[in-house]
Amino acid sequence: MSAAAPLRIGIAGLGRLGRRHAETLAFRTRHCRLVAACSPVASELAWARDKLGITALHEDLDRFVRDAKLDAVVLVTPTSLHAAQAITALEAGKHVFVEKPLALDAAACEQIEAVAARHPQLVAMVGFVRRFDPSYVQAHAHLASGALGRPFLVRSQTCDQLDPSGFFVRFAPTSGGLFMDCSVHDIDLARWMLGNPRATRAFASGTIAVHEDLAPIGDIDNGLGIVEFEGGARAVFYASRTFAHGHEPSTEVIGTAGKLTVGVGAARDHVVVSDAHGVRQQSVGDFFERFSQAFEREMQAFVDACRGERQAPLTLHDATEATRIAQALTRSLQSGSPVTLV
Ligand SMILES: NC(=O)c1ccc[n+]([C@@H]2O[C@H](COP(=O)([O-])OP(=O)(O)OC[C@H]3O[C@@H](n4cnc5c(N)ncnc54)[C@H](O)[C@@H]3O)[C@@H](O)[C@H]2O)c1
């Protein structure tokens, strides 16, 4: 591709996150043009046409990825579709950005890796957005400098505000469950912060605190996981769908010479109001509010990688390992026993 030519991108999936990615690509990402959209839902395509001026609108993903006007596709579709769609896109010769998690099981992730290996000229990147958050980037650099000695323990949580709209319960069946959908972010962070050790054993437990509708599909709304890694490092994960006050992701990394924490509490800003009702702060409402800057950096990193300007800072293999660990935690939750990873 010539350095002057903008990358021509299409987006599939225009739901909760897809619309945000579409706006980011259309209005806030350099060296690309969002020229096509795909969704089975007519009103979503109408939104892309009316709000973003996109005229190449596809109901069918196979036709979408074969659109000759596209260099790259961004998949923001239900997780259960990621594996087949990512493979179809790569085989159609398109660079692919696929939202997390890469797929619901490690074997499917390995299939995607194998297809990507047959197309080394194409970029395939997974949306672990926290790797683009300035605070997490700074934390990783500090650990990598050795200033905190050898990191050996991670405690990380992803806690969403309670969603009374019913969206989350409708979304849950295709999500892979709480560990695959939520903790997979923390799992990826733990591997990154600990220097990518291999996981050897996982144990999980959980409960339904609010969303009884999850019981028939075997999911939970609050879960705890412990993962052991080769070499002695350990990680503890907590995920919740039911926080009353706001969205509260945080990560603590403990090393032999100190520790660091990213994100304490859910405060939106530095404003503290003290009045007759007490002392309080506004809280962050959702993941998009917390990571909006990271989502923009992530899309720019994908575009830059497709244009050959810099390498994507994470690999498909990272995403495979995150899925493998989330899958082991899910199996442990279901069986009640620790799961050994081979
Ligand atoms: N990185 C993050 O922090 C983060 C946050 C939220 C969601 N996600 C991921 O993004 C993905 C989408 O989540 P969401 O919350 O936007 O879900 P959603 O249900 O709101 O949106 C899914 C979209 O996919 C579309 N779709 C369904 N089948 C399709 C098909 N065959 N072809 C094309 N489009 C199809 C739907 O019409 C809808 O627009 C999931 O994999 C989820 O894990 C990531």
Image (cartoon, grey):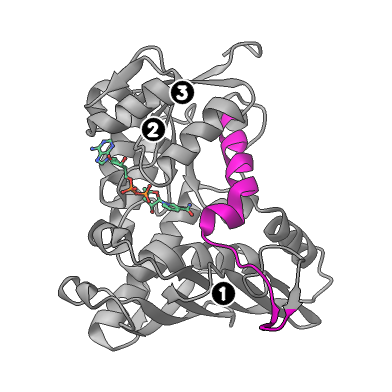
How would you rate the neighbour count of disc 3 (Cα within 10 Å): few for under 14, some for 14-19, many for 20 or more?
some
* Disc with the residue nearer the chain's start (1 vs 3): 3
Q: Using the image, tell me which numbered label, if any, was put on residue 118.
A: 2
Horizontal arrangement in the rendering, residue 315 relative to residue 148 (left or right): left
The residue located at (24%, 21%) in the rendering is 63
Q: Earlier in the sequence, mark 2 or mark 3?
A: 3
CB of residue at label 3: within 8 Å of ligand 1?
Answer: no
Q: Which residue is disc 1 drawn over?
A: 156
What range of the chain is rendered magenta?
Answer: 275-303
Query: Residue 213 — which label?
Result: none
Which of labels 2 and 1 is toward the front?
1
Q: Can residue 259 be seen by looking at this rendering?
A: yes
Q: Does 72 sit above or below residue 84?
A: above
Q: Is mark 1 within 8 Å of ligand 1?
A: no
**87, above or below 193, in the image:** above
- Ligand 1 within 8 Å, label 2 CB: no
- Camera-nearest residue between 274 and 200: 274
Q: Is 177 left or right of 187, judged from the image as shown?
A: left
Q: Which element is circle 2 on?
A: loop
Instruction: Point out residue 138 in the picture as x, y percentages from the top left corner.
Output: 76, 58
Q: Are marks 2 and 1 in contact (CB under 8 Å)?
A: no
User: Which residue in the protein does label 3 denote?
Assistant: 52
